[in-house]
Amino acid sequence: MRQRGVQKYSLLAVFFLIALPCVAALRAMDPPGARQNHNIPQPGQLAPFAIRSNVNLVVLRATVRDHKGEPVAGLTQQDFQVYEDKVLQSIESFSHDDIPVTIGLVIDSSGSMLPKRAEVVDAALAFVRSSNADDQIFVVNFNEHVAMGLPANVPFTNNAAQLETALSNHAITGMTALYDAIAVALEQLQKGKWDKKVLIVVSDGGDNASKRKLAQVISLVNQSNAVIYTLGVYDDLDEDRNPRVLKDLSRASGGEAFFPKTLQGILPICEQIARDIRSQYTITYESTNKKEDGAYRTIEVKAHEKSGGRLTVITRAGYSEPLRLPSPQRGQGNRP
């Protein structure tokens, strides 16, 4: 997009230096076995995501905060109530474990980033050196074009040399295709071996080059199990900024949107993201609505303290139920 102030460039560099090591600290052991599929969805094509872990269960990641905004640990299944379309659901499973994560870094590589290219690479390498091999990391670079930073035969990595190349092999120029980049990143997340999937999107929220529409991307988010954290980095003179888009993407997925105003505001934001990911509860339930009609279903999760006080729960706003088409009757199929 158009050139932005020095403040934006500094914020992006500090983000990589501080936020990514925080997120990368979220680790646990689990057997290997990543699926590898390097197809990228084409513009206008909606990839087949599924919020359900199987045909019956809906999976939610929930962050719980007290009145001070601090994460709340130690809650049990009995402290939660889940509502789908305002109907109380029965919780099937519940956990509060620190588990490994598949993480996608979706980074604006439009012309405004050129002066800070070296700083971004150095910051990303600092993140790699502090990370754990159990997490899976990939990079999506975008200007008016979207590109996976890693080679097709290396879908995820913690290797410093590979990530340096991933961040350096995309031209830092041109306009911005934010919607296309998020669609590609969601597709890549589904190839990760870990059930917990997170996108961190760094952008001003504007889009002037995507072939996809915002509504298509929101539809993909509604069908996905990814949690999206957006970091809106821009100055007050940036006419292309669109914080509403960043807020909508995060809210739909159960993440949050952050808009740092100063360099000093970066650190607490990054610490909060790391705490949220570490302290999330995983809740599954079997929907009482058995229709496979493609409809959007709203979700609300409530939690209460042992003392009875109300807590704030951040989770996805809902999901789109897959549409089950009727099978053709014998003799009614298409004729050659």
Image (cartoon, grey):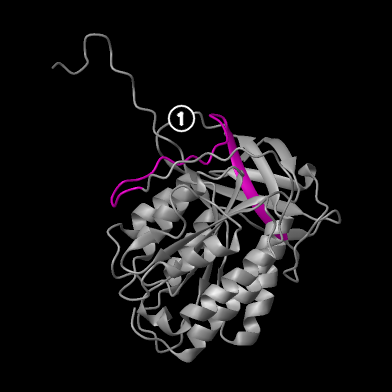
Q: Nearest the camera: 291 or 12?
A: 12
Asked if residue 248 lies left or right of residue 136, the reply is left
Q: Nearest the camera: 286 or 116?
A: 116
Residue for point 70% across, 54% down? 280
Q: Residue furthest left?
A: 336
Asked if residue 257 lies left or right of residue 291, the reply is right
Amino acid at pointer 1: Lys
Q: Residue furthest right?
A: 307
Please provide percent x and percent y for residue 19: 63, 71
Residue for point 62% across, 79% down? 266
Query: Which portion, as a residue range, is magenta?
Result: 41-64
Please provide percent x and percent y for residue 102: 59, 51
Q: Nearest the camera: 24 or 121?
A: 121
Q: Residue furthest top?
A: 331
Q: Is residue 249 visible?
A: yes
Residue for point 83% across, 53% down? 74
Is residue 98 rendered magenta in the image? no
Q: Quadrant of residue 3?
A: bottom left
> Is 308 located above or below residue 14 in the figure?
above
Please provide percent x and percent y for residue 17: 62, 75
Query: Label 1, on which residue?
Result: 291
Please provide percent x and percent y for residue 322: 43, 35
